[in-house]
Image (cartoon, rainbow, N blue to C red):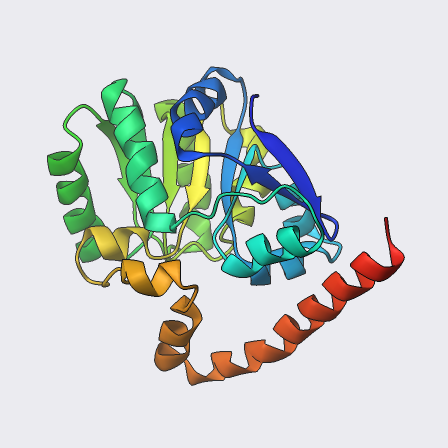
Amino acid sequence: MSIQRINLIGVPVDICRPEEMENEILELLAKPGTKQIIFLSIWDLLKARRRGDFSECVKNADLILPVSKSILKGAKFLKKDVPVRYNQFKAIIQILSILDSHYKTLYMLGSHKTTLQKAEANVRATFPGLRIVGRYVGYYSKQVEPDIVQAVFKAQPSLVLLSDGIKEKNCWPYRRRNQFSSSIFLYYTDTFGIFSERIKRIREKTFDKGNEIFVEILHNPFKIFLIFPYISYLFILLWTKLFKR
């Protein structure tokens, strides 16, 4: 692949410019087996430093796109090549547009029935060249999961888009990677909510300034306590700069 991968405090991050995205997606589609794209926030980065499935999931991902401004600042502070930051929903639109122009297929997994149905209708209307080969709601019982996995396997979609209601989030496709044939998996919790117009997108100016955390705090005041892991991130960066090469 043509993109560059850097290591930031022990976690891989990819440098993929928007103009490189189409070629990257097409290369992933041509690659056999289960592939995964991950949107990496600063909180994900800190979580990926610990041992466990999520850490392995990130390390084995085919494309890791940073979504937090703090990741870019950290790379710059450590004098590494600075990645391109992505707005999750805009990136999904770009990826779906690529698939649409090449007449590829999509499987939608997640959300409640009404949200999923409206999201599917809007995706069909926006991307007429993209064929939806299956869908299933999130928040499902454990008993039906084998049927979902089998349905995805049989459909062999180009992309499986995962949204809210998938308890294991990014780890869902990773833990089941040997049960699928050849698909790209991408998780973003608000995907179907935004497509169904149930959730409002974060304003461009807010995202560009890196202030989306304040919107999250308004919806969930307990997120104010994320200040503590953020401070630990700053200390890790400083320690790395002073004592590690």
177 relative to 157 in the view: left or right: right
Q: How many marks?
A: 0
Percent x, y of residue 202: 30, 62
In the displayed structure, would residue 154 be above or below residue 206?
above
Give left or right: position of 25 versus 117: right
The residue at 37%/60% (across/down) is 207
Q: Quadrant of the N terminus?
A: top right
- What x and y, as percent, mark residue 64? 55, 41
Asked if one can make out residue 200 in the rendered structure from this viewpoint, the answer is yes
Horizontal side of 183 relative to 89 (left or right) equals right
Could you tell me which residue is drawn at 64 percent across and 51 percent down?
75
Up the image or down, 131 lies above or below 40; here it is above
Q: Nearer the viewer, residue 245 or 172?
A: 245
Q: Is residue 105 left or right of residue 27?
A: left
Work out whether residue 153 or residue 94 is closer to the camera in this orientation and state it: 94
Residue 94 position (above or below residue 104): below
Return the residue nearer the eye: 156 or 55: 55
Question: Where's residue 28, x and y in %?
Answer: 48, 23
Q: Residue furthest left?
A: 125
Taking the image as drawn, is residue 151 in sight? no
Q: Which residue is found at the position 31% from the left and 36% from the top? A: 94
Q: Provide residue 50's location: percent of width, then percent of height.
A: 74, 58
**Residue extending furthest toward the right:** 243
In-front residue for pair 228/148: 228
In which image quadrant can residue 165 be found?
A: bottom left
